Image (cartoon, rainbow, N blue to C red):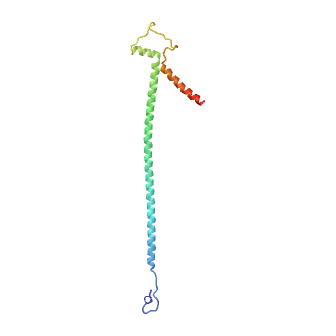
Amino acid sequence: MNKEQSYISGNTVLKPEFEEYKDKFNNNKKLQNQKIREKRLEFKMTVVRNIVIAFAIGIIIIWRYGTVYNIQGNINSLDNNIKELIAENDSLNIKLVTLSNLSTLENVSVKKLGMIREDSNQIVYSDLTKNNFKISKIVLSESKTEAGYFDKIKKLLF
């Protein structure tokens, strides 16, 4: 400052220099208000983030319960099908046992199919202990080649 500006006319006292306290206070107040706003905004953002996360977890849980419910329904329907099939199998086994009885088989063949009982001169006896069938050469050669390969491998290993 110049000397002339620091003097007050008519007086020999220097003009005091002072900084406006109000401006510093206002600046601090503005900074404090800005910090408070930032903290509030940060708090609001964390609350919103937590709400979104909770909502997403809720949706995932509901979706999972839905899939479990559908799978349980499928399991129940399969169990019912299994029970029906077991009941049908049991009834078929009972029918098989009753039809495999010789007297029942004879009654069905005579009454339903119209067969007649054989006479003693119509009966033919055969001896099944003998080998009555001719063995083909192709079958014999196949069995020999299979055994031959196995024997060759066995000889190489041992």
Is 156 situated left or right of 89 in this image?
Answer: right
Question: What residue is at 45 percent from the left and 32 percent from the top?
Answer: 82
Task: Please provide percent x and percent y for residue 31.
Answer: 45, 71
The N terminus sits in image quarter: bottom left
Closest to the observer, 150 or 112: 150
In front here: 1 or 106? 1
Q: How many marks?
A: 0
Quarter of the figure that contains the C terminus: top right
Residue 116 % position (x, y):
41, 11
Q: Which residue is the extreme one toward the right?
A: 158
Identify the residue shown where x is 43% and y is 38%.
74
Kindly indicate the quadrant of the structure image that contains residue 6. Answer: bottom left
Residue furthest to the bottom: 10
* Residue 64, horizontal then vertical, whole percent: 44, 46
* Above/below status of 147 relative to 60: above
Look at the picture and state if 143 lies above or below 22. above
Residue at 49%, 21% (x, y): give it. Answer: 139
